[in-house]
Image (cartoon, grey):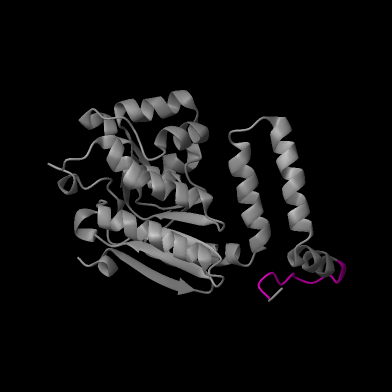
């Protein structure tokens, strides 16, 4: 595959959808795909026309994890590989100044599970499955799973899922808080687009600052979080979106957060 083949890019109504496109491998990741996805995220962040980013998979899988054929026999350590590929990708997702939705259309296993968990919001198809498969090949969960999963389900449940490599269904994922919505397989892409367009209509600057505040609060004290909120609230209050929101409230109309400020 050429670089343009492994990742499909489409923008509709402010929603940029990045589709992992190795369906014959259940979108198992190789270097080419990981670099393409990281670059596409950076491009979306720099494009003012993009308000929300969706990551999904072509075919039956979301991402089956690392394509082992792509690393077999290479003269590169595990640490070097992660630092060159997955870790920059996850950092880019979390640092993106726009909401990132991971639309899990099928199996998400190993590093693919980590990718699914790294979204700001996670939407699942009814047929989706998540498997922390690392222990099956005597490896440690990576690409952010040890950070994301316990924060979503708690330490003990996260350890159990990682140690036993049990499969999590969409119904169970919704119960555990691993996803925000579950949609029927047959309408999944349309439902994701509709959800993303709702998000795209929200105040982009305020959401960027909210994401920044939440990311900081995840590893800070209450005092530090209060200070960060105060600083970011000033930035939000000085932005034209705030004036629009207040005017809309007073005028009893829907705010227009997509106009030119």
Q: Main secondary structure of the magenta part?
A: loop
**256 part of magenta stretch:** yes
**Horizontal relation, residue 132 to residue 53: left or right:** left
Q: Does residue 141 show up? A: yes
Q: Residue 43 lies in what quarter of the image?
A: bottom left
Say how many tags the image has: 0
Q: In the picture, which quadrant includes the N terminus?
A: bottom left
Residue 226 image point, x, y percent: 74, 37
As drawn, 63 above or below 161 = below
Q: Residue 125 lies in what quarter of the image?
A: bottom left
**161 part of magenta stretch:** no
**Horizontal relation, residue 241 to residue 51: left or right:** right
Q: Which residue is at a point 68% across and 76% down the rendered structure image? A: 260
**Horizontal relation, residue 58 to residue 198: left or right:** left
Front in this rendered view, residue 116 or 85:
85
Q: Does residue 188 show up? A: no
Q: In the picture, which quadrant includes the C terminus?
A: bottom right
Residue 93 image point, x, y percent: 47, 51
Front in this rendered view, residue 158 or 50:
50
Front in this rendered view, residue 63 or 222:
222
Front in this rendered view, residue 245 or 209:
209
Q: Residue 149 lies in what quarter of the image?
A: top left
Furthest-right residue in view? 250
As drawn, 74 above or below 191 = above
Furthest-bottom residue in view? 260
Furthest-top residue in view? 156
Residue 40 image point, x, y percent: 40, 63
Furthest-left residue in view? 73
Residue 198 image point, x, y percent: 59, 65
Q: Which residue is at a point 63% across and 32% down the rendered structure image? A: 220
Which segment is the magenta one? 250-259
Q: Which residue is at a point 59% across and 66% down the rendered structure image? A: 200
């Amino acid at each position: 595959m050429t670089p343009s083949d492994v990742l499909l890019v489409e923008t509709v109504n402010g929603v940029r959808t990045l589709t992992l496109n190795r369906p014959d491998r259940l979108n198992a990741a190789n270097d080419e795909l990981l670099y393409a996805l990281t670059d596409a995220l950076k491009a979306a962040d720099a494009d003012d026309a993009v308000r929300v980013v969706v990551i999904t998979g072509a075919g039956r899988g979301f991402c089956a994890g690392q394509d082992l054929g792509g690393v077999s026999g290479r003269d590169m350590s595990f640490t070097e590989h992660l630092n060159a590929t997955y870790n920059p990708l996850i950092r880019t997702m979390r640092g993106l100044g726009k909401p990132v939705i991971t639309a899990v259309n099928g199996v998400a296993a190993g590093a693919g599970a980590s990718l699914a968990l790294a979204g700001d919001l996670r939407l699942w198809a009814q047929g989706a499955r998540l498997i922390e498969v690392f222990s099956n090949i005597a490896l440690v969960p990576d690409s952010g799973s040890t950070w994301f999963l316990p924060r979503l389900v708690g330490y003990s449940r996260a350890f159990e899922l990682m140690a036993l490599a049990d499969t999590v269904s969409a119904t169970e994922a919704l119960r555990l808080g691993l996803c925000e919505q579950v949609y029927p397989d047959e309408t999944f892409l349309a439902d994701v687009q509709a959800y993303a367009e709702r998000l795209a209509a929200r105040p982009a600057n305020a959401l960027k600052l909210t994401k920044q505040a939440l990311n900081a609060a995840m590893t800070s004290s209450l005092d530090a979080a209060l200070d960060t909120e105060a600083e970011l609230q000033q930035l939000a209050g000085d932005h034209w979106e705030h004036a629009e929101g207040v005017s809309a409230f007073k005028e009893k109309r829907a705010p227009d957060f997509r106009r030119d400020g």
